[in-house]
Amino acid sequence: ATTITTMAAAPSSTASSTPPITAISWTGGKDCHLALHYAQRNPQLQVQYLVTFRPEEANFRAHPISIMQAQATALGLELLFVTIPSSPDTDYRQAYVDGIRQLQQTYGITVLCTGDIDTMILGTIPRNWIEECCEAVGNGMKSYLPLWQKNREECLQELIHGDATTKDRPAFEIIFTCVKSPFFDASWIGRRLDSDAWQEIQNKIAQGLTPEQVEEGIQPLDPCGERGEYHTMCINGPMYQKRVELFLNQEPHRQDIEGGTKWKGNIHNAETLWFVSLKDAK
């Protein structure tokens, strides 16, 4: 677990000072890639690490570790893991704080950047989790939140079409690695998040929910999947030295949850989940 003092804007540094060593909170998905893109273009930051907060015994089906490792190699950055204990008496927040403090002491990291757009329970928690943990660490620990409360469509447009401030507008190559009912099915696994996929997501949002779905406790589809409706992994982008090659099995993994039990990662009450079935990534 780790902690950093958080800020919505980049920490200040003078022209003569060395930019602070920065790490990106990493899952390998679309949002942390966009955050990395912003951080690397910020002259006040020196991005050296990717950091994955890894609960004990977590299987990372939506964000396979082997893909993250291949991403780190392609990006030329070191991938670090912070283990979060999974025992019933674990103080989850303190575990993060302790982990962030260890990152600071061991690697000299003083800024932690996250691609969080919103809180998991949308709009009900006023502050960012990493921001709070960083403040608890203290000792000069900062957070950088380039996507916090940013317009969802703007984020997706930049990921799909590239950055409008650059001439060649390089885009990201992003695939769906986990999707959940009732909005998605197995056909989305391995599919690229492109203009066609984005249009289909918009159509699903426009359709809204049926009275039965509302009664079941299903929440409206968030454009960026902030309720966990879908997860992605990026395999290429403007900062990549090479494309990550994935080798997938034809049939994705499927998990059915009787009654749509609400567990962490299933916060919109899905009854069926599909995950990428990965042979290899390199």
Image (cartoon, rainbow, N blue to C red):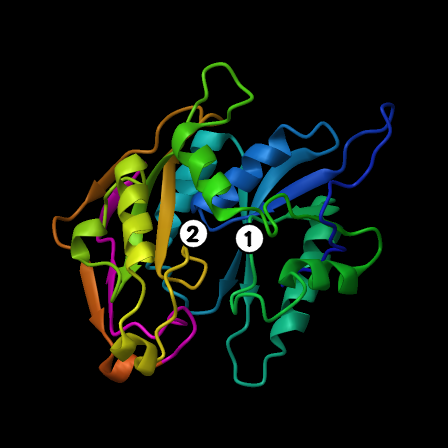
Where residue 22 appears, x then y in whole percent?
Answer: 68, 41
Can residue 243 be found in the magenta stretch?
no
Amino acid under label 1?
A: Ile
Secondary structure of the residue carrying tag 1 is loop
Mark 2–mark 1 distance (CA, rounded to whole Å): 9 Å
For the residue carrying disc 1, how many other residues have a C-alpha within 10 Å: few (<14), some (14-19), or many (20+)? many
* Residue farthest toward the top in the current orientation of the protein: 167
Sooner in the amino-acid sequence: mark 2 or mark 1: 1
Q: Is residue 232 left or right of residue 181?
A: right
Residue 169 image position (x, y, % from top left):
46, 21
Q: Residues in magenta?
A: 262-282
**101 relative position to 28: left or right:** right
Q: Which residue is mark 2?
A: 224
Residue indicated by mark 1: 117
- Taking the spot 16% from the left edge, 51% from the top edge, the residue there is 187
Give the residue displayed 31% in from the left and 50% down from the top.
201
At which x and y percent is residue 209? 30, 68
Left or right, 258 with respect to 49, comes to left
Q: Is 222 or 49 nearer to us in this picture?
A: 222
> Helix, strand, or loop for circle 2?
loop
Q: Nearer the viewer, residue 182 or 237?
A: 182
Q: Main secondary structure of the magenta part?
A: loop
Circles 2 and 1: CB atoms closer than 8 Å: yes
User: Which amino acid is tagged 2?
Assistant: Cys
Position of 71 relative to 231 (above/below):
above
